Amino acid sequence: MFRFGWYCRRSAVLATLAIATAGSAQAQLPSVSSGTLVLQLKADAATVITNGSGHVTSWTASNDPSIVLTSTGNTPANITYLATGMNGVPTVKFIDAAGQNQWLRGNFPVGLNLTNATIFWLGYHANVVDSSGYYVYTIGTDAGTGASMFSHQKDNGDIEIYNGDTTFAGADIDARDEVYTVWRTEHHGGTPVVSHRAYADGVDLGVASNSVGYNVNPDPHPIYVGGYQGGGFNFQGVVSELLVYQGLLSAEDISAIECYLQARRTGLPAPDCNSSGTSDCVDLGNDTAADCNLNRIPDSCDISAGTSQDTNTNGLPDTCEVVQLRLDDTNLTWADIDAVVLIDYDVVRGDVGTLQSSNGNFTSSTNSCLANDHFGLTWPHGIDPVPSLSYWYLVRANLPTGPPLTYDTRSPRQSGSRDAEINASPNSCP
């Protein structure tokens, strides 16, 4: 019986987010279908009111003018409006280093159900000592009601979420101090296995799971921006926009919202290289544009710009031309990647045991070039492993001009380059 084993190196892969660019006038908040927008605090001259000294006295929601957050505490001097503070885009700065309990506070409409919520904010934490915890926002109250708050804070360098009952910590985020970042928290109602998540530019920050749940009900629904509802714990940093959605948004909607916020962050014109009418970031997030090489640029733009070759003119970068290989007891077979251009193929074989013991090193585990420049779609492998042995096989295409294509996959989970490692082996195909 022919046995086939396959192993490849794996490495931790951080979720990445496309960075699109747009001027503040061009970046428009997209609509979503998986949740309801209940609050948009967007820093601009129309919604942020300041006194004669430039200190913020109120911030009105862009989506609902009945939601007005007003300055509290001793004076408004610790909150300022910067018209071009974020790469030419407006932002609000909080500097309550003296602990004067300065924040902005307002109320959501009566009857709002926030059992589940998805919250985004664009800005950063200041590079200051945070041994007591600094709250960017809190929603709800902990006045004897137990787990009834949503929050985002930084404490001792770590991201933390407090639900009115227990604090749950995640990764160290000091490296993001004073770096404009798109932050996201997801709060799940009831008692699910995982009741919250926290992200920075799409990277999961690993906030500990719990089954406490969140349930900011019933009324009132106060919201504080720049601090906690009690004394101290005041935020130091900047906020350019804060969005609160009722419900847990879908991956597609999250991509669209984070793309919009990334666009606001840069203050530059948004690229739409394929002239689709939407930014490249939105196209990629919605899978309406292909990105097989995962460089966050539509493949069609790579090809038209000459940064990726498409020798056989099939609309796919040559580096993504992956041959689908099958095998049975005697033969390897694969599908032709192009029905018009005459293509030949290379086939290599290696030892799975060596690949596994070398932590996925294809240089040391490649032991034979079975076929070189082979015109055809099949090859007899001619081997039946004895018990305890197994072999791997890979095939790549060669176009009439240019270098060979790839042994690699299109998967972001692949670690390293098979092409480079196999080409370094003395047993590779020339």
Image (cartoon, rainbow, N blue to C red):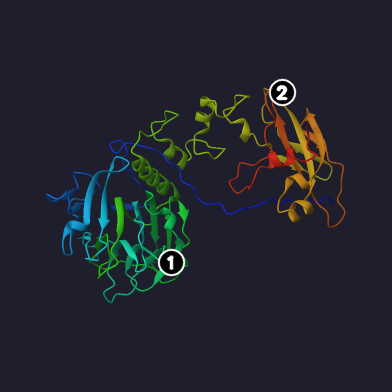
Tell me if I can see residue 115 in this picture: no
Which residue corresponds to the image point at 37% horizontal and 34% vertical from the top-left?
270
Residue 72, percent from left and from top: 17, 62
Seen from the viewer's position, the closer of residues 112 and 255 is 255
Q: Residue furthest bottom?
A: 144
Disc nearest the viewer among 2 and 1: 1
Label 1 is placed on what type of residue?
Ala
Question: Does the CB distance between marks 2 and 1 fall below 8 Å?
Answer: no
**Could you classify mark 2 by the number of other residues whose Cα lies within 10 Å: few (under 14), some (14-19), or many (20 or more)?**
some
Residue 272 in percent (x, y) is at 41, 31
With 3 as the anchor, is 53 left or right in this view?
left
Dot label at residue 169: 1
Q: Quadrant of residue 379?
A: top right
Determine the residue positioned at 67% across, 31% down: 337
Q: Which mark is residue 342?
A: 2
Which is more N-terminal, label 1 or label 2? 1
Residue under the image location 68 percent in, 28 percent down:
403
The percent coordinates of residue 192 (x first, y second) are 45, 67
Q: Nearer the viewer, residue 55 or 373?
A: 55
Q: Quadrant of the C terminus?
A: top right
Task: Out of 94 and 308, give the one closest to the viewer.
Answer: 94
